[in-house]
Amino acid sequence: MPTAPSPKEPTVVVAAALYDRAGRLLAARRSAPVELAGRWELPGGKVEPGERPEHALARELREELGVAAEPVDRLPGEWPLKPGYVLQVWRTRLRSGTPAPLQDHDDLRWLTPDEVWSVDWLDQDVPAVREVLRQGRP
């Protein structure tokens, strides 16, 4: 008897819960694509085929923000994005560099816990940001 084909695994998008020494969380404002422009997210990007999620996150932060960062640990859970994509969040330590909006972002903000909800987060990032706040910094 033939077996049913296994459903395609979703594409993983990794995001950084990146804190500075003062305990502020980094948020990035999207400049692209148009439908996401002006909204805020945790920085990161897609895991490429054959790439480990923590390596993808370090690569994305280097490409998008110009920093060297080290994923510390993954927060439990994952959150649906658009169909076929899920978000995983890693608590991440900045190793070197000063974040700058180099690619797909036009602004960055370091947010204190009291300021986290002062930006217009992407709807799909809101549950992940709640979990980041619950878990705290690395």
Image: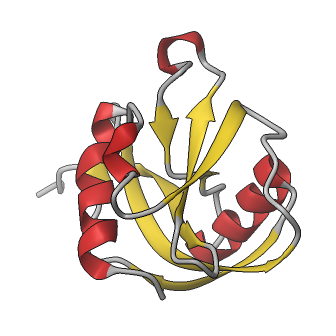
Instruction: Give the answer, above or below, for where 10 lies relative to 124.
Output: below
**Is residue 99 at all visible to an observer of this figure?**
yes
Identify the residue at image location x=39%, y=54%: 87
Q: Position of residue 134 (x, y in %)?
A: 23, 74
53 horizontally vs 96: left or right: left
**Is residue 9 at all visible to an observer of this figure?**
no
Picture quadrant of residue 117: top left
Q: Position of residue 96 (x, y in %)?
A: 86, 77
Q: Quadrant of the N terminus?
A: bottom left
Instruction: Give the answer, above or below, for where 117 lies relative to 114.
Output: above
Identity of the residue furthest to the left in this view: 1
Colour scheme of the picture: secondary structure
Identify the residue at image location x=82%, y=48%: 100
Instruction: Give the answer, above or below, for where 89 lies relative to 125.
Output: below
Identify the residue at image location x=66%, y=22%: 31
Q: Position of residue 58 (x, y in %)?
A: 72, 69
81 horizontally vs 52: left or right: left
Q: 8 or 111: which is nearer to us?
A: 111
Q: Position of residue 41 (x, y in %)?
A: 48, 43
